[in-house]
Amino acid sequence: MNETTDARVEIYDDYGVEGEMSIPNQGRSQTLGEPDFNTLDEPIRDTVLRDLKAVGTKFYHVLIPREKKSLLKEWDLWGPLLLCTFMAMILQGSAERDSNDGGPEFAEVFVIVWIGSMIVTLNSKLLGGNISFFQSVCVLGYCLLPTAMALIVCRVMLLYPQTNLLFIIRFLFTIVGFVWATYASTAFLGDSQPVGRKGLAMYPIILFYFVVSWLIISHTAS
Amino acid sequence: MDPQLEFHNAPSGSMQNAALLDIDSDSDMDPGKTKLTDNPLEDSTDQSTKKTSFWSLGFFQNLFDVDTDQVYDRLYGALVPFPKSFLQHHVNGKPDLYGPFWICTTLVFSIAISGNLANYLQAGAANENYHWKYDFHAVTLSATAIYSYAWIVPLGLWAVFKWMVPEEHRLSFLELLCVYGYSLTIYIPVSVLWVIQLSWLQWLLALVGTGLSATVLVTSVWPAISQMEARRYLVLGIIIVLHTVLAAGFMLYFFHAYPVLNKKNVSLVPEVTTIRNVMTNNATHS
């Protein structure tokens, strides 16, 4: 009995939604929570700019991690892709020699960043974290921003002849980038873990940024 | 309590489900537990494999079902094996893979990073003007060595147990993985200390580290091994030798200074600098 009435209610609900569909855009977006723009008839520039703006806002939130939920609302992987490509381009060793050149290949940086963030995410899922897979990958990727900035600073300093003082400055910048990245990702992801397991979920994140920072400080111009 | 129902619930992933599931299955398993009291370890691992299939997230959630305090306790047990055996007193029949996996990963990077540091110190000692390059591929090498050691040896040991040990004394594969993973803990601080370029200190550290972690291993697997009459010392010997070879291999390959190697490195300097020149030239032309 119960089931049949439920089914009927559902049918009526469907009719109700169909009725609303004919109402113009604004009304629909308010009721269903869909975006209030239509990508079919807007210029491409608007579409691209909107995405860029979303990426830019996320970067801003990583630099100033005040709102905890700001990065978790809508995930995208554009920012991580940009950062990862940029870092891989700078960090890669030269391809001309195969021995003792030292630096990782382009693809190896990619693997470290993507597989690394996926494993870290999988770890927090397995520990019982309450967050979707790509949300977490997105946050981990965006939080690479401070380390990428440290990389830029280090790269600029490498243009000058190397002294111990310059090395210490590079080292300090790398440390700051590492701490910043860890702090930001902890702020975003910390709440998704059960109480007794925060430490277990945070440790891999720290290790992840530590390894990335090691790649940065070890990079000595190719 | 329909077992089929439980099976379907688990992969949905939320922690609440998993927690509920544990409670349910415990009450289910109680009669079974009292039947198999001679080996509670075997029983509880069977339980976890029965509940969910290998390919579901729930199966692995059971293996990551540890709290921070528990992991601290196990790490402590793996570092200080003296009063009690690791497996019987710290794991209590609930092996996890969180510890082994992250201990191996940490060890991979700590060996690669401090190995590079050691290499730098050696190069600096050999030649003042040496243009040092870090070697990222130490990571690849140490990862291959550590990950394969941490699961191939337990797999082999598990097969040997299956063959030679009566069923009620066997250790499950997961328990062996857990013991082997945690037994590598001591090598993390040791690998950092190996950076110090004093030959006697390096050997001493290798000796202490191997001694401690072999103690963890041996005290944990001894109850099973002692069941093999004639071959028990052979198997025990193989376990200890493999463990020692691993530690000695790490130290000699990544940390120990060889005079011959230093010469080879130094000879590379002109080539590296010429590449740099070529690259900067290209950069200015383009």
Image (cartoon, coloured by chain):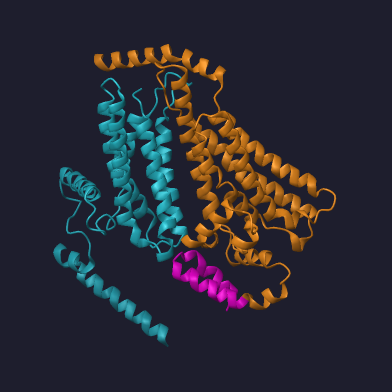
Closer-to-camera residue (B248/B43): B248
Quarter of the image holding residue A6? Answer: bottom left
In the rendering, what colour is chain B?
A: orange
Who's the residue at 66% across and 36% down the image? Answer: B245
Colour seen for chain A: cyan
Q: Is residue A43 visible?
A: yes
Q: Residue at x 53, y 53 (%)?
A: B99
Residue B28: quadrant of the picture: bottom right
Quick one: A110 or A99, which is closer to the camera? A99
Front in this rendered view, residue A174 or A41: A174
Q: Is residue A133 above or below residue B4?
A: above
Residue B24 magenta: yes
Horizontal placement of A161 versus B150: left or right?
A: left
Span colored in magenta:
B1-28
Q: Main secondary structure of the magenta part?
A: helix
Q: Residue furthest bottom?
A: A1
Residue B52: x %, y % from top left: 57, 64
Instruction: Work out whether A56 lies above or below B222.
Output: above
Percent across and percent down for residue A37 are: 17, 56
Instruction: From the top left corner, tell me how far across and down residue B29 is, in percent.
Output: 63, 75
| Residue B136 visible (yes or no) | no
